[in-house]
Image (cartoon, grey):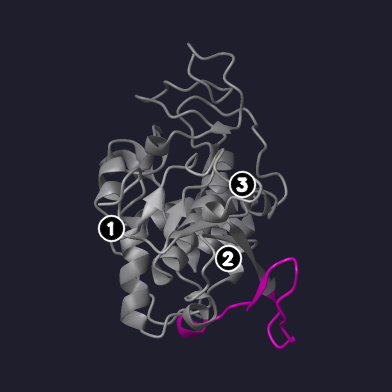
Amino acid sequence: RTGCGGGGSEAPRGFVTLNWRRVLESEEGLRAVPRVERGALPLHHLRLMHVQLSALRNGFIVARLLGRALVLPPTLCSCELGFFTRHVHEACRAPDHPTLPLPYLCPIDHYLSPAALADSPFAHRERGFLEGKRTAGAEQWRRQVVLPCPAGASCFDGSEGLALATGASEAELVRRLGRVDAPVLHFADIEAALGRFESSAKGAEWHEQAQELLDAYCCTTHPNFMKRGQTVPYILPHLPAAWPGRRRDDYFEPYRKALGALFEAAGDNETARAFRE
């Protein structure tokens, strides 16, 4: 296994980092923290996690395709994780944490399974891995930015970074970036970086392997989640239509439908649609 972080190959070719500010600013109001009833589903938090985990899935996949390790991004939580039903109060904090700032930087075990992550095929490093290492002139930690280039446009590399066609195929991604010698590839827009796998079976398999890394939110009194011990699974959106061969996971389907209905009832049709597609 690789040192700190583990997962994946023993000798990654380098590292991948993500422009997390863009992810957090991709939708209006993602960091909002409204009050909720005790035991109710904190839909604002689940929406924030849904957006972040979709980008995280893509980061894991792109890094693996390039033989690199993903440096975990600074994922935010906008509701505290509870330990039992009604543990988290209306302000989305536990009663003994009244000054916890919201959103807060999520501990990894608040959204990922550390055991699954350690044994996964996705090489990774903890989010602080590069802090203090990228100093001026330090070739060992040189960073190359990867910028999205609109489909159909003429894409040219420049002083700001390497151009990658939006929605590139797996083969195009590897051909374009697989031999870049920069120790760190920083993706300005990770969700624009990969459009499809060459093999539909491979796409489905890697998506499911990423899903296995995710944990759940605790806890809710909502009846649709009683069979799961009142926990709400974090569920990745289906791979985009451009990624062929997606298949539905029967285990998650009832929870996917329940979350879609709850978001629709709350007037968030965009998030509802992501769960239903």
Q: Do the residues labelled 1 and 2 touch (CB within 8 Å)?
A: no
Residue 160 appearing in the image: yes
Instruction: Give SS at disc 2.
Output: helix
> Residue 138 lies in magenta, yes or no?
no
> Residue 166 lies in magenta, yes or no?
yes
Q: Which residue is drawn at 60% across and 32% down?
A: 103
**Where in the figure is residue 198, as x and y percent of width and height?**
41, 85
The answer to which of marks 2 and 3 sits earlier in the sequence is 2
Q: Do the residues labelled 3 and 1 touch (CB within 8 Å)?
A: no
Residue 93, relative to residue 187: is it above or below?
above
Q: Residue at x 51, y 78 (%)?
A: 173
Residue 78, relative to residue 21: is it above or below?
above
Residue 274, relative to residue 240: is it above or below?
above
Q: Give the range drawn in magenta.
A: 149-172
Q: Residue at x 47, y 42 (%)?
A: 129
Disc 3: which residue: 266
Mark 3 neighbour class, 10 Å CA radius: few under 14, some 14 to 19, many 20 or more? few
Foreground pick, 123 / 14? 14
Under mark 1, the amino acid is Glu
Q: Residue at x 43, y 82 (%)?
A: 244
Real-space CA distance between mark 2 and mark 3, rounded to the nearest whole angstrom: 26 Å
Instruction: Judge depth for marks 1 and 2 and give the one in front.
Output: 1
**Where in the figure is residue 233, as x and y percent of width and height?**
37, 46
Under mark 2, the amino acid is Glu
Real-space CA distance between mark 1 and mark 2, rounded to the nearest whole angstrom: 26 Å
Instruction: Judge depth for marks 3 and 1 and give the one in front.
Output: 1
Foreground pick, 137 / 166? 137
Disc 2: which residue: 191
Instruction: Give SS at disc 1.
Output: loop
Is 24 situated left or right of 205 in this image?
Answer: right
Under mark 3, the amino acid is Ala
Disc 1: which residue: 10
